[in-house]
Amino acid sequence: MSNPQLSPFGTKITTADIIDTLGFFDSWEERYKYIIDLGKELPAMDDALKTPERLISGCQSKVWIEPHIIDDKLYFDVASDAFIVSGLLGLVLAAYNGKTAAQVLAFDMEDFFGQLDLLKHLSPTRGNGLRSMVQRIQQVAKGT
């Protein structure tokens, strides 16, 4: 079983890092490549966790999220069957992984996406899927 505390997202890879890095790229093609590369940094999710109850509805691709609460902080095992969606999961985890429920609920994800200029560069179904991932994590935070 993986240790979600070992994920670089939220610790070594922060939202500020992502905003800064994406700002260096001139084209969205380069930004997509960076986002895909972020997805490759995600720790592998144990296949046993890829169950229907962990599957996020509303996503075009398959996305699984398994929350863990360790020392009052939320950590997430995540996986997707699409490279770009794995990268989008990395963006979300940069904001949420290793944070308290209050920090998760206080974080302005729409502002973060706005700073990245992201949503208008995703298909409507990808944008809806991204929002579904955020909603699932926020639901977990509200339930703690």
Image: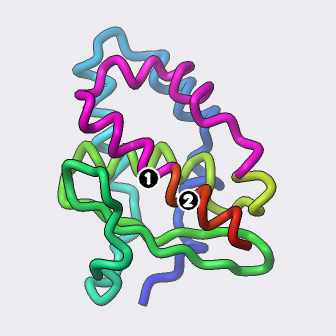
**Residue 118: in magenta span:** yes
> Alpha-carbon distance for marks 2 and 1?
6 Å
Quickly name the residue at label 2: 137
- SS assignment at label 1: helix
- Front one among 74 and 130: 130
Residue 137 vertical placement versus 131 (above, below): below
In the picture, the quarter occupied by the C terminus is bottom right
Q: Looking at the rendering, which quadrant does residue 126 occupy?
A: top left
**Residue 86: in magenta span:** no
State whether the magenta stretch is mostly helix, strand or loop. Answer: helix
Q: Which mark is residue 21?
A: none
Give me the residue at 52% from left, 65% from top: 7
In the picture, the quarter occupied by the N terminus is bottom left
Which percent across, then down, holds residue 125? 24, 37
At label 1, the amino acid type is: Met
Quickly name the residue at label 1: 133
Compared across the picture, whether 132 is left or right of 129 comes to: right
Compared across the picture, whether 24 is left or right of 137 comes to: left
Q: Residues within 10 Å of mark 1 (few under 14, many from 20)?
A: many
| Marks 2 and 1 in Cβ contact (< 8 Å) | yes
The segment highlighted magenta reads: 105-134
Residue 102 vertical placement versus 43 (above, below): above
Which percent across, then down, holds residue 127? 34, 34
